[in-house]
Amino acid sequence: MSPRRRDAPPGPTEAARLADDLRGRILSGELAAGTPLREEALASTAGLSRHTVRTALARLATERLVIQEAYRGIRVTSFTAEDVRALQELRCALEAEAVRLTRERYGQSWPEEVTAPFQKAMLELERVASTHPDDWRLVATAHAAVHRALVATAGSPRIEEAYARLDSEMLLLLVNLRPTYSAEEVANDHRAFLNEVQVDGESAVRRHLDHGTQQIWPRSARGIDADH
Amino acid sequence: MSPRRRDAPPGPTEAARLADDLRGRILSGELAAGTPLREEALASTAGLSRHTVRTALARLATERLVIQEAYRGIRVTSFTAEDVRALQELRCALEAEAVRLTRERYGQSWPEEVTAPFQKAMLELERVASTHPDDWRLVATAHAAVHRALVATAGSPRIEEAYARLDSEMLLLLVNLRPTYSAEEVANDHRAFLNEVQVDGESAVRRHLDHGTQQIWPRSARGIDADH
DNA sequence: CTGCGGTACATTGTTACACATTGTTCTTCG
DNA sequence: CGAAGAACAATGTGTAACAATGTACCGCAG
């Protein structure tokens, strides 16, 4: 058997594991927006070298979970209201096009094998919303999975990937904002959305995203941690 | 005055400069698709350390100009026909949404201060097409600038950025494929496209991109450097 | 007291060298 | 001829140090 040491598993590199760890801590809110991440500190607490820490941070920077300025360090990304709007516009571009492609292929009534994945994700969202209505991170994660599954129906790898890239960023946004949006509401809105989207297509996507943005604006307008 | 040394400018880091250099060499075709980039070799020829080379390569990897596999090295990205399609779909998503946003704001006839940037880029494309019709890289660069300027009219930073990210990738694609598409044709097609887009909006975008893809498919179908 | 310049400190960028880990290739043996 | 295993190549990671830059503090002139 030769069970590999727990400390040093096989394939994944150390840097990848540290990146995963930090991602989790950022998304859980343990590392708040604006928190500076010092290389040396992370290196010593994680028991790794500064180089490895740097590559892990570089990875997170590509996911926009942290921002890096030369010689000025890295800190957890913080959002302004403007950022929220811009991010939603990008999401909208990707999701609307994905829905358009799927409808181009299957029309207004998609076959079951196409809808199955996002229906399943939807069920999971409803389950989480009813069993853990207060664990906002769980809800946000399940929510993201629904959208991702919907986008995946288009079968366009790059759109899917671009959307997935936004995923953790959206999670971070939602975790930080904690809008006045109950888990039950989220579930209901998405159930309705999924019913509409096959018939109404892109316009349903835009309505849905606009609605979501509305729930977020009020808070973000006050500025969460605006950098300037 | 105190002209800083050319070799070691102030702000930009060494890694950033190496990344720029490599990007140029990849996009010029000097480093062909599939070429492995060895850390040690680059380090010695560039007079830098392996670590610095690694960070530069990591940056290029986020631009998808190179792909990285753990313990297996980095090599210049090579495209398959499927990659081309997926990339065009993503471009379409971004550009169509950008045009939609601009039309949502300005209707079917955009004010001159909005059209000015892409009109200027268009003039540059026509100039390059007539003066350097055989320098495909120049043409491709000018071509990319036109699209980027069009996308910028939407004023959506994230869409713009996502599109810009695709830029060098598109350049790489065009440089490698060298389609049967004369510089003059490119210029004419885009002049017509820009005239249509204000009136027809997203559908004009889709028509234009489809047309472009048609010029590329035949070659790519034969496989440029397909990895498998 | 305020505003300016300059110095010291903190942090990141970069280097050099060494070793560990993994992928690839070549050799050897059945 | 094919497969197990050794040798090699390349990347991943560690340690230690120095260089370059940003930031904060401090004193001085007005």
Image: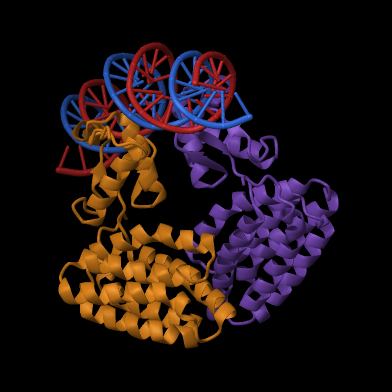
Chain colours: A orange, B purple, C red, D blue
The quarter of the image holding the N terminus of chain A is top left
In the rendered image, residue C5, in percent from the top left (x then y), is placed at 32, 28
- In the foreground, A44 or A123: A123
Q: Nearer the viewer, residue A3 or A96?
A: A3
The answer to which image quadrant residue B84 occupies is: bottom right
Q: Quadrant of residue C7?
A: top left
Residue at x 29% of width, y 41% of height: A18
- Give me the residue at 67% from left, 50% from top: B173
Left or right: B53 as drawn, with respect to B182: left
Q: Which quadrant holds the C terminus of chain A? A: bottom left
**Residue B11 vertical placement versus C1 (above, below):** above
Residue B8 seen in the current view? no
- Kindly tell me whether residue A141 is visible in this rendering: yes
Residue D10 or B26: which is nearer the viewer?
D10
In the displayed structure, A64 sits above or below A175; it is: above
The image shows residue B155 at horizontal and vertical percentages of 51, 67
Q: Position of residue B64 (x, y in %)?
A: 54, 47
Residue B218 place in picture, x, y as percent? 77, 58
Q: How many numbered circles are shown?
A: 0
Q: Is residue A196 left or right of residue B19?
A: left
Determine whether B147 is above or below A97 in the image: above
A12 relative to A182, above or below: above
